[in-house]
Amino acid sequence: MSTPRLEIDLGKIEQNARKLVGWLASRGIGVTGIVKATLGSPAIAQALLRAGVKRLGDSRIENIEELRRAHICAPIILVRSPMLSQVGRVVRSADASFNTELDVIAALSTAARHEARTHGVLLMVELGDLREGVMPKDLLDTVKRMLRLPNIALSGIGTNLACRNGVRPDISNMAELSSLADAIDAAFADSLGGPIRVVSGGNSANLDWAMSDSDPGRIDDLRLGESILLGREPLGRRAIDGLSTDAIRLVAEVIESNRKPSQPWGSVAQGAFGEVPHGPDRGWVRQAILGIGRQDIDPDDIHAPPGIEVRSASSDHLIIECESRHLEVGTEITFELGYSALLRAMTSPHVSRLI
Ligand SMILES: *Cc1c(COP(=O)(O)O)cnc(C)c1O
């Protein structure tokens, strides 16, 4: 079998998603299944839909187009503000998109009219993490202006925390999002024909808040990627009780195995990626090289099996040590992945997938 490869257990992914959907349903919250870390894999998207997610989300239009080519007709939302240069593709393939700029919404309106469609807009609100979002004081005015645009419908509002600055979703910022939803309803109920539907509280980092006793308020949607695929919550990268953390594993192959000194010799400057050798002299060690590198994974974000330690990596070589045994050339080593390693492995053309 070819290496390096990702071994993807669709059953475990579906099971993770089904459990999260069930737990959150008991709190009145639905799930948008985020598939961007899979490069828009139709097989994984189908597993999430079988598990009961309400819709799919992805941040790249190319991935959404891939899902449509695979005849996935579930609602799909683009979870990043569209590029002006892509609005035509966005209204053709996505039912709705996350938005923060009136100029973009106006361009979506024109493109949607051209296609004789209505495009949904979910307005993102800035609540402190300082990534995307309209400032809360500007939200009502933004709604007012967008309601004048033809072929555009307000699908809801949302926020995103914990991604840039690690700001925790908590009782206070979630209550603020709820009260903003109330304010929109109070000001625009007539033109909206009822309360806004989707109030999207955030990503996998919201699970602690969502599963606590606190009142979910108006929040009726979470967008989950990492927790479904890797079974971990992103704030502390703890494994979530009851979920599998090994639904996606990486297999790489030994291409050299030797006993070598643990310390380099010669005049030492910095390595290809700015590394300088450090640590005590551990004498001679059993060193092996795997045929995978920084181009395919984040070496600081992979979890080796017991007895094996990841020491360093260059573009195409991953250096490990295994004290207990000699790893024959050709031996396959299986790793669990963190989010950053998963992203790179999924996007590397050199890593195959076994589903
Ligand atoms: C990637 C992304 C998500 C999913 O985040 P996870 O931590 O993987 O659950 C949710 N919302 C937005 C806007 C995103 O870009």
Image (tube, rainbow, N blue to C red):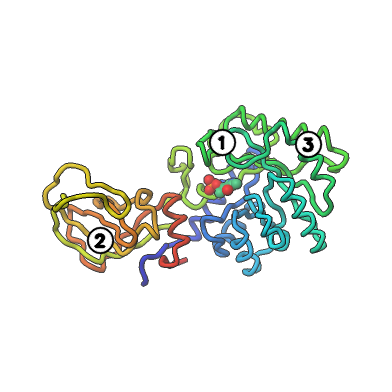
Residue at 20 percent of width and 42 percent of height: 279
Type of residue at label 2? Ile
Residue 92, percent from left and from top: 72, 63
Quadrant for residue 69, please give it: bottom right
User: In the picture shown, does residue 3 fall above or below 37?
Assistant: below
Residue 260, percent from left and from top: 14, 56
Which residue was labeled with disc 1?
129
SS at circle 1 = loop
Residue 70, percent from left and from top: 62, 69
Cα separation between marks 1 and 2? 40 Å
Q: Which mark is residue 141?
A: 3
**Whether residue 90 is visible:** yes
Mark 1 or mark 2: whose residue is earlier in sequence? 1
Apparent side of residue 123 relative to residue 2 in the rendered image (left or right): right
Mark 1 or mark 3: whose residue is earlier in sequence? 1
SS at circle 2 = strand
**Whether residue 224 is visible:** no
The furthest residue to the left = 283
Q: Nearer the viewer, residue 170 or 93?
A: 93
Q: Mark 1: few, some, or many residues within 10 Å (few <14, many ≥20)?
A: some
Quadrant for residue 201, please give it: top right
Residue at 25 percent of width and 47 percent of height: 276
Question: Which of the two marks, 1 or 2, is nearer to us in this view?
Answer: 1
Residue at 70 percent of width and 45 percent of height: 101
Apparent side of residue 338 relative to residue 217 in the rendered image (left or right): left
State which quarter of the image contains the N terminus.
bottom left
Total number of numbered labels?
3
Q: Mark 3: few, some, or many residues within 10 Å (few <14, many ≥20)?
A: few
Apparent side of residue 193 relative to residue 347 in the rendered image (left or right): right
Which residue was labeled with disc 2?
289
Type of residue at label 1? Asp
Q: Mark 2: few, some, or many residues within 10 Å (few <14, many ≥20)?
A: many
